[in-house]
Image (cartoon, rainbow, N blue to C red):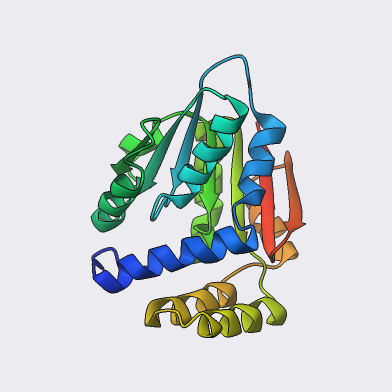
Amino acid sequence: MDDLNLATDELRQNLEELEVVNRWLGGYSPVINALQKNWNKTKKVTIADIGSGGGDTLRVIAEWAKKKQLDWKGIGIDANQFMIDFAREKAKNFPEITFEKRDIFDTSFQKEKYDFVVCSLFCHHFPDDDLVDMFKQLHQQSSICLIINDLHRNWLAYYGIYILTRLLNGSRLVKNDAPLSVKRAFRYQELKNILERANITNYKISWRWAFRWQIIIKK
């Protein structure tokens, strides 16, 4: 899934499968919980989802926000045109959500400002040195907080998702990518070191089910 030119029926199936797994395991709860704690109800809120993929995180936010009668706008950012097209189709009944093909490292994007910036299962695709710069940048682009939802690297999470994707008879991509994502994921001290290298001090790292790290970085 790291290949920006990948655009196949197999990738489409992979995105559908990942959403099923995330909904089943409560994989969106770190984001919803962080938003609930920090939402400013006095104005319309903007949320940027970085590396938005199939757009499932924004759709889950939309479902939650509708129940809470919250006024907001979501912008999904991804560098892969297939992902953008797929996400737009899936979100066609959510007028509050839009998607943009952008390079987050481009200076034009770095000038953008949002209330919340969300990175959900995005950070483990990057080496630590890139994450230091990315955290600095996205922290500056958020007026309320930067929310990171990513995987906890340990043997139980690895073998758990390895077995689950096979029990569900998942596609080749999900059988490969899900365990690989856990291998690339983080332990607590690694996240702490990245944040400290980025000179970020106002943060909280919390462990949440199932094997997720929730990081809330406030202004």
Q: Is residue 72 visible?
A: yes
Left or right for 34, reference 93:
right
Left or right for 19, reference 150:
left
Left or right for 93, reference 130:
left
Q: Position of residue 64 (x, y in %)?
A: 58, 38
Comparing 61 with 34, the one in front is: 61
Quadrant of the rendered structure where residue 212 is?
bottom right
Q: Position of residue 147 (x, y in %)?
A: 60, 44
For residue 43, above or below residue 11: above
Left or right for 192, reference 16:
right
Q: Position of residue 59 (x, y in %)?
A: 46, 44
Q: Is residue 128 visible?
A: no
For residue 42, above or below residue 20: above
At x 50%, y 63%, the residue is: 20
Comparing 204 with 133, the one in front is: 204
At x 45%, y 51%, the residue is: 56
At x 30%, y 74%, the residue is: 10
For residue 88, above or below residue 86: above
Quadrant of the rendered structure where residue 13 is?
bottom left
Q: Quadrant of the C terminus?
A: top right
Q: Please, which residue is most extreme toward the top here?
A: 42
At x 28%, y 48%, the residue is: 89
Comparing 158 with 215, the one in front is: 158
Q: Quadrant of the N terminus?
A: bottom left
Image mark count: 0
